[in-house]
Image: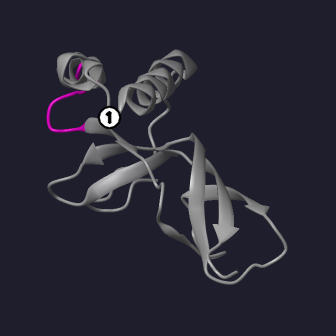
Amino acid sequence: MKMSGIPSAPQIDKRILSVLNNVFDIQRKISGTDAESKISRNLEKIISSFSSGNEEFFIENPLGEKYTETRTDIEAHIVGDSTDDLTVVDVIKPIIRYGNKQLGLTSLVQRGIVTVESTKN
């Protein structure tokens, strides 16, 4: 059932998710290199090729963000003994959403898989 104005989570072909995950991995690998400026536009075109009208995919990198157990958009693996002030230190899979970001109407398509660690020593 679709709530008024809120898109329901679409059924996404696993091949599309595989391509989007690989685009994220390439973006991460070229970040900060000379290749980034040459390749970024092409990677954005790949992502936008899956768009439909005003709805599109959004790949979110939660690296460096605070983590709490109430977050529903990521699945975390905790490194270390402390669970205080956890921060995302590695992203295995990004958060992928689909919808109209300008209107704030997006659906979670893939939960991110991350590693978190306490910032307290």
120 versus 65 height, above or below? below
Residue 57 occupies which quadrant of the picture? top left
Q: Give the class, few, some or many, for how many residues have Cα within 10 Å of label 1's Cα (few <14, many ≥20).
A: few
Residue at (15, 38) in percent of width and height:
54
Amino acid type assigned to the residue bearing label 1 in the image? Gly
Question: Does the image show residue 8?
Answer: no
Q: Circle 1 sits in a helix, a strand or a loop, which is it?
A: loop
Q: What secondary structure do most residues of the magenta stretch adopt?
A: loop
Residue at (61, 81) in percent of width and height:
85
Left/right placement of residue 114 relative to residue 46 reads: right
Left/right placement of residue 21 relative to residue 41 reads: right
Residue 80 occupies which quadrant of the picture? bottom right
What is the span of residues highlighted in magenta in the rendered image? 48-55
Label 1, on which residue?
32
Q: Position of residue 6 (x, y in %)?
A: 32, 58
The quarter in which the C terminus is drawn is bottom right
Question: Does the image show residue 3?
Answer: yes
Q: Position of residue 114 (x, y in %)?
A: 63, 51
* Viewer-nearest residue: 10 or 73: 73
Q: Position of residue 75 (x, y in %)?
A: 67, 56
Query: Can residue 83 be found in the magenta stretch?
Result: no
Residue at (23, 38) in percent of width and height:
55
